[in-house]
Image (spheres, rainbow, N blue to C red):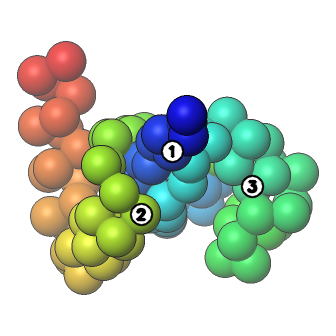
Amino acid sequence: MLRAVRWCVYVIRCGDGTLYAGITNDLEQRIAAHRSGRGARYTRGRGPLTLLHQEPARTRSAALKREYQLKRMRREAKLAFLDTVRSRG
């Protein structure tokens, strides 16, 4: 039987205050890659990195669509979204 791959969308805050959204099927490994400089070019040299948000996605396609939505949001909208999510949980 095939193991279901679980995708997630995540948002991290870089040390310079900028936000980065990405997708992965292994969040722990991906965050470690970002922190070690092997992640996205954008996050290299912008540490320390803080995971602010993660949400599950059923498929890679769904994760990519959600990542695109987050990346299209203006900074103020992203921060409001993150505040709303944190206040719920």
Labels 3 & 2 near each other (Cβ < 8 A): no
Closer to the N terminus: mark 3 or mark 1?
A: 1
Numbered badge on residue 51: none
Give the residue at x 49% y 59%.
23
Give the number of the mark in front: 3 or 1.
1
Q: CA distance from mark 1 to mark 2?
A: 9 Å
Image height of 88 relative to 30, above or below: above
Give the number of the mark in front: 3 or 2.
2
Corner quadrant of residue 40: bottom right
| Tag 1: amino acid | Val
Residue placed under numbered mark 2 in the picture: 60
| Tag 2: amino acid | Arg
Q: CA distance from mark 3 to mark 2?
A: 20 Å
Image height of 54 relative to 30, above or below: above
What quarter of the picture does the N terminus occupy? top right
Numbered badge on residue 34: 3
Numbered badge on residue 5: 1
Image height of 20 relative to 84, above or below: below
